[in-house]
Amino acid sequence: MMITLLKKKKAPNRLTAIFLILLFLASCDSVEDKKGRFLLKGNEKLDENDPKSAIGFYQEAIALDSTYSDAYFNKALAHLRLNQLDEAIHDFSSSISYRPDYFEAYFQRGLTYLDNGEFYKAQEDANRLISLNEKDWRSFFLEGLTQEKLKNFPASLEAFQKATQLNPENSDLWVNQATILYYQKNYTEAKTKLDQAEQINPSEPNLHNLRSMIFFDEENYEQALTAVEKAITLDNRHAYFYNNKGLYLLFLDRKEEGLDWINQSIQMDPKNPFALRNKGIYYVMKGDKISALQYLSDLEKSYPEMDLVQEYFLKAQAL
């Protein structure tokens, strides 16, 4: 009798088995898990200040779920890092379309509308925020910024006051109130607001810059210079701080030093009309009619309500 021998089956390779298990687990990932991982990867890239790569990951998440509101929102933030305002607004709008009560998206879109010069659209978002949550200070903050852009200063001041009542420890809101009061030439009340802001945050550079502007309007040029120099010490990235220092030096009869600061401001922001105005003022003070009119003629047409423009344009013509 012939006996048939049975061959023993070879045990599967352990690495192969592990790979098959991982492959199986990966295939079991839900769309929710996958899109969440892309969102997290995008957030990591944004934290690393790599917005272009972040956008790519957010787009992968959106490809998996075209209604993924958070991915649109974060993608919009990445576009803002690249100063791509139209793209950011589009993504904020997509985010809102899939989540109509997305407070943060309305807030960020409203701010972006302001930066993009679309003030009435920003106003619509401010109204929406107030209807969504009138207990959140940001609702009235956006309202205040919008009304300021629309030159409706009483409404702007009222909105900033409401925001401050909701968040009294926010020094920026006190500075915002002071700014509107400065526009209204209510310097006494503006100083009071700045004092309040300084109690909360003495290292806020904008409050010292605004205080310098009030001192200048009061013809207290030495104190104006001291205040703006403090602002520059706290934050040396703002062209308008340099521009203001240059202006104050002109009126302290330190003209060449003032011109150096004005030129530095123009290098930082070539389109700043205040710096161009100040350079025109410098040439009036130097008696250079041709150069003065080169700067002041265009400003007189484009910014006729800017302080000092009309005064020095007439002085330039009279040289």
Image: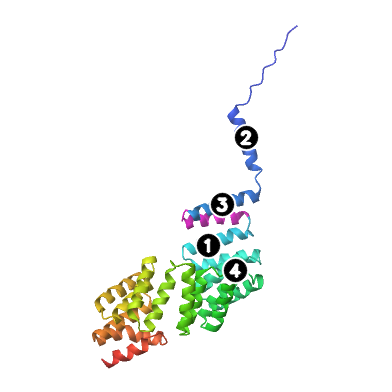
Is residue 83 shown left or right of residue 248?
right
Q: Position of residue 21 (x, y in %)?
A: 63, 35
The residue wearing badge 3 is: 40
Write the start and end of the magenta stretch as one range. Answer: 48-64
Residue found 59% across the figure and 30% down from its top: 16
**Dominant secondary structure of the magenta stretch?**
helix
- Using the image as rendered, state which of residue 153 and residue 173 is in the foreground: 173
Q: Is residue 214 visible?
A: yes
Residue type at mark 1: give it: Leu
Task: Give the crowd class for mark 3: few <14, some 14-19, many >=20 residues within 10 Å.
Answer: some
Residue 220 appears in which quarter of the rendering?
bottom left
Label annotation for residue 77? 1
The residue wearing badge 2 is: 20
Residue type at mark 2: give it: Leu
Of marks 2 and 3, the one in the foreground: 3
Residue type at mark 3: give it: Leu
